[in-house]
Amino acid sequence: MKKCFLAVITALSLAGFSYAQDDEYEEEEVVYEEEAEDEAPAVQKSSKKQVVEAEEEEDEAPAPKKAKKKASKPRPAAENGTFGIGAELTGLNAIRIVYNLNSDMFIVGLLGFNYDSWSTEQAGASFDDSNWGAELGAGFGMVLNRSVLPLYVEGDLRLGTNEEDQTHFGIDAWLGAKATVVKSLELAGQLGLGFTHTWWDEDVVPAKIEHGTTSIGLKTKVFATWYFM
């Protein structure tokens, strides 16, 4: 009987000991879970701090530079072309070289040449004589109106000489109108005011005499220009 009683007590004591150990294990697990919950907010705080720092870095980043304005494109050249060569139809003694800067402005190079010959009779005899002259010039023009018949103004400077050692200097102001006859072929007429001063020397024994003349008058000119570029 005593043995049975001791066995029962021993069994109860062992059961109580095991139950106590199970409670400790549960308490330790609860502590671990609480510690994990305590550590979680710290992680969240650190992540919030990183977000705030990233936003501050974005705010401090320099603003992107504004794109530079595109350079203004040059105006197109005249419809017929950029470079052309023309000839006077009134005298066929001058060549015009035209370069269009854009649709409204152009520059002109002038190359002139003329040759005159004649004969005279004196005391029953015939004498033949001739004279030649060359001229270089440059001009600048601007289109005024393109509505129906394009109107333009032009100013020229001229310098020339001839066989008799006469030299002349001229300034011309023109008002002109032009029209395209066929593709790349332009016909133009000009009405202008011209100023020309001519001077030369004459040897008269025992001295040399200097001569000079000045002329001012209205001038007209018709020419055709072919644009090949």
Image: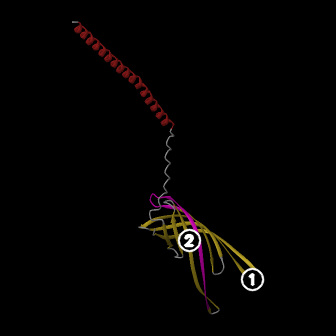
Magenta includes 82?
A: no
Q: Residues within 10 Å of mark 1 (few under 14, many from 20)?
A: few
Q: Magenta stretch?
A: 126-152
- Residue type at the position of mark 2: Leu
User: Horizontal and vertical percent for residue 159?
Assistant: 62, 72
Q: For the point 58% across and 82% down, which residue is it?
A: 116
Residue 176 place in picture, x, y as percent: 52, 64
Q: Residue at x 49, y 47 (%)?
A: 67
Question: Mark 2 Cα within 10 Å, few/some/many (few <14, many 20+)?
Answer: many
SS assignment at label 2: strand
Q: Amino acid at mark 1?
A: Val
Residue beneath disc 1? 204
The quadrant in which residue 175 appears is: bottom right
Q: Is residue 31 left or right of residue 15?
A: right
Residue found at the far top of this picture: 1
Q: CA distance from mark 1 to mark 2?
A: 35 Å
Q: Where does the image place residue 215, in percent across and percent down from the top left?
A: 64, 70
Q: Tag on residue 131? A: none
Quarter of image, res 134 = bottom right
Residue 196 vertical placement versus 23 (above, below)? below
Residue in front for this viewpoint, 112 or 18: 18
- Do residues under tags 1 and 2 come within 8 Å of each other at their CB atoms? no
Of residue 207 and residue 157, the one placed in the foreground of this image is 157
| Quadrant occupied by the N terminus | top left
Q: Quadrant of residue 213?
A: bottom right
Query: Dominant secondary structure of the magenta stretch?
Result: strand
Foreground mark, 1 or 2?
2
Where does label 2 land, which residue? 110
